[in-house]
Image (cartoon, grey):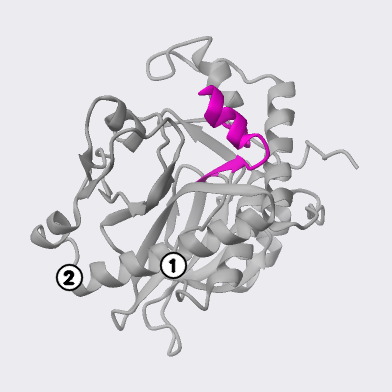
Amino acid sequence: MPLDLTRVLPHARIPELPKPYFGKVRDCYDLPPTAEVPEGRRLLVSSDRISAFDRILAAIPWKGQVLTQTARFWFDATEDLCPNHVLAYPDPNVVLGRRLDILPVEVVVRGYLAGTTSTSILTQYKAGARTMYGHTLPDGLRDNQALPQAIITPTSKAFDGGHDEPLTPAQIVEQGLLTQAQWDEVSARALALFARGQKMAAERGLILVDTKYEFGTDATGRILLADEIHTPDSSRYWIAEGYEAALRDGTRPPSFDKDVIRAWVVARCDPYKDPIPEIPAEMIARTAQVYVDAYEAITGRRFAPDTSGPTPLDRVRANLSPWFA
C-alpha cells in the first residue's frame, strides 16, 4: 500500500503542555517530578521536520514515527546492556522519559574508516594523521575498511550552538567533563551497545558502520542511555551485499541514501547563505520511502503507519491530553 503523504507532523506545539523546549526536529515538554521519578519526566515528540545546514529543510511524512519506533526497537533490544531513559510510549511519535542531566560528551563509536566531515577519522587519516582521539591507527588502511577493532571518538557537546571539539579520554577527565569512573562506565557501555548493534544488523544483511550515543544521569547519579539509539539519523548503515565490491573498487558502499534532499539543495544554492528553494513533492516522497525502507530493513518488521485522528497533530494532542496543565 502506498504511503499517505498527506499525513505530516510539521510540529507538536501544544500550549496546554508545560515547560516547552523546541529543538530542530523534536518538540519537548518537561513534566513535574513524582515520588517514583524525582528527577522529573520529559515528553519528547519527534516531528517530521528534517534538518541540515543548521536549518529546517522540509517535513518528511512518517519520519518522526520511523525514528521513534526504530529507537524503541533498539532500546528494547539493549536494555540488558544499559538502562535507558524510557518510561512509556504514549504515541507512535512520542517518548515519555526521565529528565536527565545530559553528560557533556558526545560518544561516537566507529567500526570502519569512514566519514566525510573534517573531524571524521577517514578525512584525518587521508591527511596523514595516524593518532586521533587517543587512538593510533595502522598504516595501509583503505577507505571504508573495517578497523582492527571498534573505537570511540568522543567530542565535546556544544549545548550553546558552538562547534563540537575532538577529545581524548585523558582530556575528558583532565577537563572535568566526566570523572574517570564515569568515562570508564560510558565507554564500556557504548562499546557493548555497538557490538550488539553490529551483530543484530549483520543478521539483517546490514553493516552498522558508526553511531553516536548520548548519556545522562538521573537524580541518583545513575548513568542512563538517552535520546535515540541506532536510528538512520544517528547511525551510518551499509548494505552488506555489495560492500566487498565497493571496497575493492574504492567506491562508496551501498547505504540508505537519506542525503537525497541535502544533495538536491547543495546543487541549487549555498545552503548556509542563500534561501532554500522549495523541495519538490517527488523528493519528499522519495525521502519518506527511504525512511520507511530503513525501518523495515533494520528491524525486520513491517512499518505500520498510524492514521488515527483527523491529523497527526490531533492524534498526538489526544494521546498527550492526560498531561495537560
Q: What stretch is highlighted in magenta?
A: 233-258
Eyeballing the image, is 84 above or below 62? below
Q: Position of residue 284 (x, y in %)?
A: 69, 28
Q: Does residue 47 sit above or below 104 in this rendering?
A: above
- Examine the rendering and report whether any part of residue 252 can be seen: no
Is 56 in front, or is 187?
187
Say whether residue 216 is left or right of residue 206: left
- Secondary structure under tag 1 reads helix
Give the residue furthest to the bottom. Answer: 35
Location of mark 1 (residue): 192
Image x and y of residue 163, in percent: 25, 38
- Residue beneath the point at 51% across and 52% down: 27
Residue 88, compared with residue 287, is above or below; it is: below
49 drawn magenta: no
Q: Give left or right: position of 248 versus 150.
A: right
Q: Quadrant of residue 215?
A: bottom left
* Residue at image point 47% right, 75% down: 81
Q: Which of marks 1 and 2 is nearer the N terminus?
A: 2
